[in-house]
Image: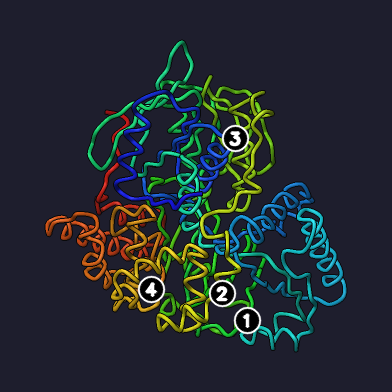
Amino acid sequence: MTRSALTKHSRAAALDAMTSGEPLDVLVVGGGITGAGVVLDSVTRGLSTGIVEMQDWAGGTSSWSSKLVHGGVRYLYNLDFKLVAEGLRERGLLLTKTAPHLVKAQPFLWPLKTPVIERAYSALGIGLYDAMAVIGHRGMAVPVQKHYSRAGVEQLFPDVRSDQLVGGIRFYDARVDDARLVMTLVRTAQSFGAHAASRTQVVDYLKEDGRVVGAEVVDLETGTRRAIRAKRVINATGVWTEDTEALGGNEGGLQVLASKGAHVVIPKERIKGDVGLFLRTEKSVLFIIPWQRYWIIGTTDTPWDEERLHPVATRADIDYILDHANAVLSSNLSFDDVIGVYAGLRPLVQPGTKDGGTASTKVSRDHTVVESAPGLTVISGGKLTSYRLMAEHAVDHALGEEARKKPSVTPETPLIGAPRLEAITRQAPQIAAKYGWDKARMQHLLGRYGSDLDTLLALVDDDPELGKPLDSAPAYLRAEAVMAVEYEGALHLEDILMRRIRLFFEQRDRGVSALEELAQIVGPRLGWDEQTVRREVSAYAEMAAAEEAALGTMTDAEAEAARLAVADLVPLADLES
């Protein structure tokens, strides 16, 4: 596997390659977690493959999840053992083989409110969860459950309200930077020869004799229209599924609704605890998840009927999350404690298809694959944890009988940063000493880059100034901004601040204070003149202000109106024109 650099130049080269020469074997539409999984699955089967995404990589749902890799312990309540087993098997692969640098084991506390009976059936359920993980992965990827008394829980998580429980059970799942996982999947696919172009919108399908044979796309950076021919097209566009599958006059396909999930970010010192919390609410579940510098708390689960491009949280969403967190925490969190907020949309696949039929392949209760038109495979639903399995199902479906001759190899395919991870981790003390970085800095860097840290170190060796922290965000190095544009596909400041260096939800000002510094670092590398710099800075600042205005509203309609008052820096093409 060669070093892969997603850049503005590789993007242009990919568009040229996809629009000239022989048709691709597979064109993937959608660059979220599912599409990124599909492009890697397809190219590693030996198929010529391309992928296009109308926003930045992970620009939709896959940027704004709870950032968990989990089997779904709550699904055991519904006796959905197959779904849990699938998730646990995929969790084990990510933790041990495909992305151990990005996916980290995370202990959670399951609070017990009543003695004996609740402890017994909860222990049975989590014990089954652990057992299924061992069976699915042929060994332990995380430790098994451990029981605590009330006093033990108070020691493990001092800010849990002792009057709300009699004890607890510690169990393990895992967490991940969702957008980073998506970008790394695309980089890995590119290293095997896939063509990848973000900010490229499909506006129509190409058809011959009723069969989809490619797509017409708009390069949103230039406005240029191009035709990409492909033997098979796989649509993985999440909450945009009905829009994209209907292009070219297709009437069949999946019906997909959107559900909004909001999260808040709290400073690490504001909650005293050493593990995460898993809580059941009347509507959904609430996770209180520790990260290196903060806590993420969420999620809500409410229908979303507004525009899907920019879902936003309301003050009502934040109040709901804080009220439920404060029901079990003695921290007495308030709105003033919140340093970040984000919201995303989950695609909910409805039974059947739009033409009244049933899906031709329903491979799991959690996700569905269907041929909505000859040559066009559509996949939707599912969860982040199972992206690899979903991708395998989608490519199998698109290939049909040919899939037997070219089975998926992604269970054995480590992502960029995973090979040699143990070796570079053991070298961390020497690296830290050489560059003057502390243990926390090394933990941060290894958790983002893994063995690809070598790439960042080469940048610092060439320019030692890049080894210094950002003045506006000292948790990050200047080199990390360079990595974002020279290796990770960022084209704009918003790409960096929302999905590479995620100050959008890590700082109270959403990263506005970092705009000038970041523009100074990346502008010359992206070929920006002063006019472009000013446009980039202004666009992000205006967007951040609109997000803040949305938080002052109580309804989705009001919040969306506040957010949409600001135009996008890179607007989408009008499909109705």
Tell me where residue 469 sits by quadrant: bottom left
State the residue at coordinates (51%, 40%).
39
Labels 2 and 1: the sequence-earlier one = 1
Percent from the top left, x then y, of residue 373?
A: 52, 21
Q: Are marks 2 and 4 in contact (CB under 8 Å)?
A: no
Residue at 66% x, 48% y: name it. Answer: 411
Q: Return the disc, 1 or 3, that comes first in the chain's sequence.
A: 1
Query: For numbered disc 1, what is the local secondary structure?
Result: loop
Question: What's under tag 3, amino acid-wise?
Answer: Ala
CA gap between label 1 and label 3 equals 39 Å
Sort mark 4 into few (<14), some (14-19) or many (20+) by Cα contacts within 10 Å.
many
Residue to which mark 4 is pinned: 476
**Among numbered discs 2 and 4, the one appearing first in the sequence:** 2
**Percent x, y of residue 13:** 32, 39
**Which residue type does callout 4 highlight?**
Tyr
- Mark 3–mark 4 Cα distance, whole angstroms, equals 37 Å
Q: Say whether disc 1 or disc 4 marks the residue closer to the N-terminus.
A: 1
Residue highlighted by disc 3:
394
Per the image, label 2 sits on a secondary structure element best described as: strand
**Place of residue 432 in the rendered image (x, y in percent of width and height, measured from the top left):** 46, 81
Give me the C-alpha separation between circle 2 and circle 1: 8 Å
Mark 2 = which residue? 290
Q: Are marks 3 and 4 in contact (CB under 8 Å)?
A: no
Residue pointed to by mark 1: 274
Residue 205 position by quadrant: top left
**Mark 2 surroundings within 10 Å by alpha-carbon count, few (fewer than 14), some (14 through 19), many (20 or more):** many
